[in-house]
Amino acid sequence: MFTSRSSRHVTQPKDPLFPKIILFGDSLTERSFKDCPNGFGSVLENYYAERAAVQNWGFSGYNSTRLKPHFTSIIRSLQSTNSSPPLFITIFLGANDACLPPSSAHVPLPQYEANIRRYVDEILEHPMTAGTKVILITPPPISIKAPLEDEFEIPAVTAAIKKAAVEQRGYKTYMNKKLYAEKIMEIARDYEAKTDLVAGLNFWEAMIKLGNQQRSDEDVNNSAGTGKVSESRSESESECDAPPGSGCLGARDFGDDVFVDGLHLGPLVSNELNTVGPKGIPLKSKRVMMCFRESFSRSLLPGGQSFGKIS
């Protein structure tokens, strides 16, 4: 098997028939294991301890095109050990593909779609993955700090600040990532109409819900003691005019507890992909998990048990 930065996580069980779960993706997958105790990889690993081997096939900095040889290695590893088909495979890609040119990570949207469909088709058609379920996970948004508002509220100045914000590369990258997230859900719906073996998880939507809820919580907290609730923007304004993390004027950034560097998940939402998260996690993480569970539209585990309802 190939050697990589993630190969330390790709350990084969002694018994080739021992159940496997494969997490395939970029750094959001790679960093979800040992270096992130609350990451979805670590939690799945702990939850399935002694019942299934959870394998980390995440590669930092890789896009859906560059990962093709590694996906082939997944199939070859199953063949070489004569393994039973994995219980399920997650495909969590797009965060790098959606970077704007001239970034070397950029993959045009049509090629990205073709790559994802190739992976899904091979899983559905290859004998080594017969019956394996596929979970397509959308890339999340990023978090860009919004410009300061004009304290004098001069309309011309406010308009200029707003215009400058949406012309920034950060905002354009944010909106491009949204297109890639929408494409994943489009692909997932297409497969869901044909088979029960594929489901889409709208991680983007769940994160936007979290950002909007954070702002709502702040509005309530800021109004405490005043006897009246502060005036807040409508849902359409918060989601369209200044979505959380977009860097638009008036938008709320997610904060370091959500994105440690604007891209990678922080401690508050490391449980976002944790549909089997531990008890006692912060209330906001529980809220995010509930949003995320709503994205499951198919039963993804043996015996008809819904992946999103594991307790």
Image (tube, grey):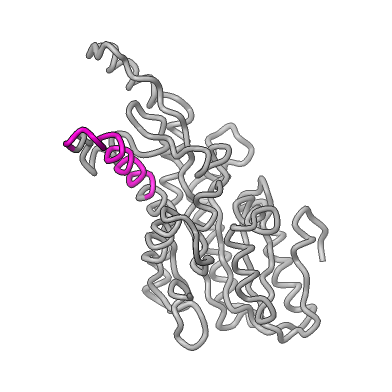
**Vertical placement of 141 versus 289: above or below?**
above
From the image, which quarter does the N terminus lie in?
bottom right
Q: Is residue 80 magenta?
A: no
Image quadrant where residue 168 sits = top left
In this picture, residue 231 sits left or right of residue 96: left
Magenta residues, as a range?
Answer: 210-228
User: Where is residue 151 drawn, in percent x and y?
Assistant: 30, 14
Q: Residue at x 41, y 45 (%)?
A: 178
Whole-percent x, y for residue 166 in the image: 38, 27
Which is nearer the eye, 23 or 74? Answer: 23
Q: Residue at the spot x=29%, y=43% of the render?
A: 216
Residue 243 horizontal side relative to residue 96, left or right = left
Membership of 214 in magenta stretch: yes
Q: Position of residue 35 (x, y in %)?
A: 69, 53
Asked whether 195 or 296 is in front, the reply is: 296
- Single out the residue that lies furthest toward the left: 228
Which secondary structure dominates the residues rendered in magenta?
A: helix
Q: Is residue 144 above or below residue 158?
A: below
Tell me which corner region of the image, top left, top right, bottom left or bottom right, holds residue 292: bottom left
Count all numbered tags in the image, as a single digit.
0
Q: What residue do we see at 40% from left, 72% from top? A: 192
Image coordinates for residue 306, horizontal then vertical, percent:
44, 78
Camera-nearest residue between 115 and 255:
255
The quadrant holding residue 187 is bottom left
Question: In the image, is residue 199 above or below residue 289?
Answer: below
